[in-house]
Image (cartoon, rainbow, N blue to C red):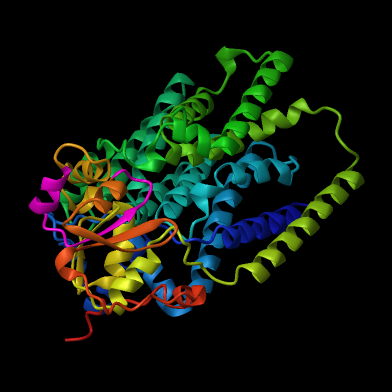
Amino acid sequence: MHLVFYITLFLFIFGQGLYFNNIDNDFFARLIVGKTYFQTASLLNWDFLSYTPTHRFIDHEWGSSLVFYFLQSNFGDAGLLIFKAIIYFATFFLLTKIIILHNKNIKLHFLPFLFAINAIANLFFSTVRCQSFTFFFFALWLYVLERVRLENNTRLLWILPATMLIWGNMHGGCAAGFGLLGLYIVGEFLNKKPVKKYILTLILSLSMLFINPYGIEYLKFLFGALTLKRELITEWQPLYSTLGLKSCVKFIIYLAIFIILFIVYLLKFKPDFKKTDKTKILVIFITLLTAIKSIRLQPFFIFSTLAFCYNDFYKIFTKKLPDKIDNIKELILMGIIIIFALGAVYMKKMICMAWDYPALEVEFLKANKIKGNILCEFHDGSYVAYKLYPDNFIFMDGKYEEVYPNNLIYVLKDINLVKNGWEKHLETYPTDIIIINKKYKIFENLKANKKFILTMQSPTYALFLRKELVRKDFKAPSAKGRYYIDTKFDTNIDWSVK
């Protein structure tokens, strides 16, 4: 019945990917980098989109940019959606292989995977993200390390430095691989097992980071990025924050179920701690701490608990259904998921241009050929620049850690919340146009400001222009939602045009 399980798993991941099909905020920045490389055979080492100070562009996601642009430009929405389904299915497929490594006779039930995937759906299923590669490689490394431990197959360790050559150029999350190797070194040492092979693998894997377009500067950047404060970034908030408690309800339910099952397992089987696998405990405990510390790191805890605890929790349920009834149950689940996936295909045929972007405001500027420097929320910056360059430049975008001085995001916060001489900031960084989310305090202040005029607004955003830019003959932006879907990837950024 493993085949039924895998079909169900793939269809569920594919269907989820179609339902959660909004565009990630930084995806447009990835397309810009990818397009630049394919048209010029070189990577950007500077930022050409901003009117604020920038420094050398060290792009830890450049490899992902190439993949995403290639898929989007050649296969459109379908290519991106199918790729997303494949890489996430491959991630969970590797986790099932770890489960089977620990017990070849185990039965794979779909419900635990359904709960696990749902618990992190918001982190997983917006278009495709560079984190997709980190999730896949983390699962791959976990599988390889478990095979080395359980089968004593040391030769497989070459896979880790070989894949780090790719992972290190896809996403800065490759640091998770080094963290995982470190946990295995400590865990196996506590298990009183040889660790020399893991230490050598760690050294070889670290050496692979030097093979990148930026040389040693790349390593300096990664270290700085790992220690960078991100308290203003939503998905880097801790689980116990107000935002974390509100946005991570499904993960909290998953965590609660895990804790209950863990307590039941301890009470029922009373395992001897001295004989307990220290590596397993360490990986689960550390990934739990990271999940509590940051919303974005929750998938690693999900992966670890599925891989290491599935067999243990499976033992709790001694009264199992007869095989025929159990198989029928899985077939019924597969049927439901097939209907779900087909419904997703019918309802969501493409990646949508969700209205959490300032699409109307951007179209207004474009239709009326209004030029100038635009201040907008940093996570909207990539979209605004992608659509309006070269007529307009932005304050900053989601590449805040790669391009801009560390203080700039705090300057933007002061402007949005009307703090610390916010008006002076608009003069220090000469701003002509402001696209602001109406939830921020600056919205009301700007309405009373004589230098900026409220020119248009949508349910979420408002557009303010400097008084000098206001005209009486402005055209209204298109009101057709389909127009914004069909033109979502249109841009004037084109290096092939001289």
Residue 451's spot in the image, x, y percent? 16, 57
Q: Position of residue 40 (x, y in %)?
A: 21, 77
Q: Is residue 460 left or right of residue 323?
A: left
Q: Position of residue 75 (x, y in %)?
A: 48, 77
Q: Is residue 216 left or right of residue 2?
A: left
Q: Residue furthest toward the bottom?
A: 498
357, above or below 441, in the image: below
Instruction: Determine which quarter of the picture holds residue 20.
Output: bottom right
In this view, the residue in front, 221 or 426, is 426
Q: Is residue 143 visible?
A: yes
Q: Residue at x 51, y 39 (%)?
A: 247
- Nearer-the-camera pick, 387 or 462: 462
Q: Residue at x 23, y 41 (%)?
A: 418
Q: Tell me if 215 is positioned left or right of 245 in this view.
A: left
Residue 177 makes an appearance in the image: no
Q: Nearer the viewer, residue 41 or 296?
A: 296
Residue 189 is one of the magenta-drawn residues? no
| Count of numbered labels shown in the rendering | 0
Is 424 colored magenta in this rendering? yes
Left or right, 77 with reference to 34: right
- Asked which quadrant contains residue 215, the reply is bottom left
Q: Quadrant of the C terminus?
A: bottom left
Q: Residue at x 20, y 56 (%)?
A: 395
Q: Give the residues drawn in magenta, as a range.
A: 422-441
- Residue 18 position (above or below residue 440): below
Q: Position of residue 67 (x, y in %)?
A: 39, 67
Q: In the rendered view, would you say 135 is above or below 42?
A: above
Decide: is 464 above or below 75. Answer: above
Viewer-proximal residue among 453 and 435 = 453
